[in-house]
Image: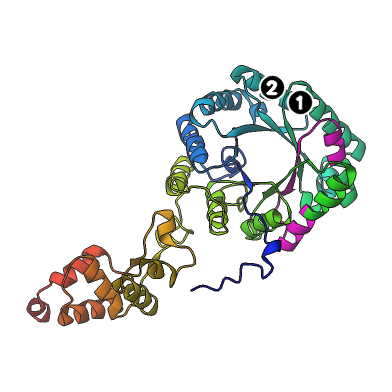
């Protein structure tokens, strides 16, 4: 019943939406100035849920920031080996040997490789602010990657602020890292500067001109984006379509300033585009992250928010209720929802409030096994339209059982 304008007319050009996902909740997400730092147990539970959701890789922190960070990363690496075996783990580091050494210690202690996400600013803005010369930056990249590879660690060069960097400089930095043995390149929209066109243009340029043209066609590209313009998710999808192999995100999009790509929303969109991951644990993942970080999930948050599949509008409720009454549950799930609630363990909800009509009341009564007596329907509808809010179940139950004679006295 749906003509899907999201599908290219030429299906041969349709993108392959199965992409690797990298969860940065426990590192980049925790840089948000308003989050509570999760306990070790909460971090462990999040790693388990990432594994259940089919996330491919996860950050366990930046050990070089201090003894506590190193201890947490070590405990998480040990835990994940047993409880989340499919997750590939990585740690963040500046392109400084001293930052990489504790990652090597953790890798040796747990007996498994821990990827180094070695980051350095790539835009002229950052280099000017720091007083860095191009030769100094290239030297730092080469030394850091060389040391990590010698320690047996896989390395991804993370070019911060890639969306504002010059093409020639990105090429020079990437080639320096790859010549020393780096295995991935991560392009970053560090300050949320990009629009989808720009994200795609950057990925395509690096794929064709920096990697393929120089004999590095085997090197995968990561995409790491922020939401300062409210475009993080759209940019991530554009980057995937342009050829990004792995995309970074955080639970609920938590992160510095306006946050990151929301991993949960990315998972939902990939699922709707044909990705086969099992998202049964999505609600628990979001709720666990919210509790662990001291964040409330907004009521209108996609899929897991309280109001995501809830309506109290008369026209909308009537369409949903009529489909339900006809026994067409799939139609009820889609007629006023672009995301099928049942695909994510949710259901359509119909409330009764100031914008409601009779179908709202009839639906509420039917769902509660109550008769649809016309006087009751009119009484509830009149009260709802005079109200300033959507009525609670308790308020509705009180109106249904109220004595009309008592009300008129």
Decide if residue 331 is in sight here.
yes
Is 59 one of the magenta-colored residues? no
Q: Position of residue 59 (x, y in %)?
A: 61, 36
Instruction: Confirm or deny contact between disc 2 and disc 1 (CB under 8 A).
Output: yes
Q: Is residue 74 left or right of residue 83?
A: right
Label 2 crowding class (10 Å Cα cut-off): few <14, some 14-19, many 20+?
many
Kindly state the secondary structure of the residue where label 2 is placed: helix
* Residue beneath disc 1: 148
Q: Of the residues under marks 2 and 1, which one precedes in the sequence? A: 2
Quarter placement of the C terminus: bottom left
Classify 180 as above or below 268.
above
Q: Is residue 114 left or right of residue 377?
A: right
**Observer-nearest of 34 and 50:** 50
Kind of element beneath mark 1 = helix
Residue that mark 2 sits on: 104
Q: Position of residue 199 (x, y in %)?
A: 74, 57
**Up-down: is 157 above or below 388?**
above
Coordinates of residue 50 in the picture (x, y in percent):
52, 40
Magenta range is 174-203
Asked whether residue 195 is drawn in magenta, I would say yes
The residue depicted at 43 percent of the width and 72 percent of the height is: 335
User: In the drawing, what numbered circle is on residue 4?
Assistant: none
The answer to whether residue 142 is above or below residue 281 is: above
| Residue 192 visible within the image | no
């Amino acid at each position: 019943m749906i003509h899907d304008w999201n599908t290219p007319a030429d299906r041969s050009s349709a993108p392959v939406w199965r992409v690797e996902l990298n969860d940065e909740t426990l590192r980049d997400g925790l840089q948000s100035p308003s989050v509570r730092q999760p306990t070790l147990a909460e971090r462990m539970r999040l790693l388990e849920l990432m594994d259940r959701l089919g996330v491919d890789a996860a950050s366990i922190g930046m050990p070089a920031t201090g003894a506590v960070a190193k201890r947490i990363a070590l405990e998480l690496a040990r835990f994940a080996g047993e409880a989340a075996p499919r997750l590939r783990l990585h740690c963040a580091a500046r392109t400084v040997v001293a930052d990489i050494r504790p990652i090597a210690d953790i890798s040796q202690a747990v007996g498994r490789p821990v990827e180094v996400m070695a980051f350095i600013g790539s835009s002229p803005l950052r280099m000017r602010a720091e007083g860095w010369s191009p030769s100094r930056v290239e030297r730092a990249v080469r030394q850091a990657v060389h040391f990590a590879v010698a320690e047996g660690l896989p390395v991804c060069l993370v070019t911060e602020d890639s969306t504002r960097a010059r093409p020639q400089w990105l090429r020079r930095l990437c080639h320096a890292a790859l010549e020393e043995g780096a295995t991935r390149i991560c392009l970053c929209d560090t300050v949320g500067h990009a629009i989808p066109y720009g994200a795609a243009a950057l990925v395509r340029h690096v794929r064709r001109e920096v990697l393929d043209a120089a004999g590095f066609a085997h090197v995968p590209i990561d995409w790491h984006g922020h939401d300062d313009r409210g475009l993080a998710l759209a940019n991530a999808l554009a980057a995937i379509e342009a050829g990004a192999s792995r995309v970074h995100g955080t639970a609920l999009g938590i992160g510095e300033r306006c946050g990151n790509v929301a991993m949960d929303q990315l998972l939902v969109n990939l699922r709707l585009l044909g990705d086969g991951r099992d998202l049964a644990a999505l609600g628990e993942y979001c709720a666990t992250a919210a509790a662990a970080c001291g964040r409330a999930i907004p009521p209108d948050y996609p899929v897991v928010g309280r109001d995501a599949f809830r309506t109290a509008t008369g026209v909308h409720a009537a369409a949903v209720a009529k489909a339900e009454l006809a026994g067409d549950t799939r139609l009820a799930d889609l007629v006023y929802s672009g995301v099928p609630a049942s695909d994510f363990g949710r259901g359509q909800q119909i409330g009764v409030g100031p914008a409601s009509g009779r179908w709202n009341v009839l639906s509420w009564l039917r769902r509660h096994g109550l008769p649809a007596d016309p006087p009751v329907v009119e009484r509830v509808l009149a009260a709802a339209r005079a109200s300033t809010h959507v009525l609670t179940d308790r308020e509705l139950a009180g109106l249904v059982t109220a004595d009309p004679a008592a009300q008129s006295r």
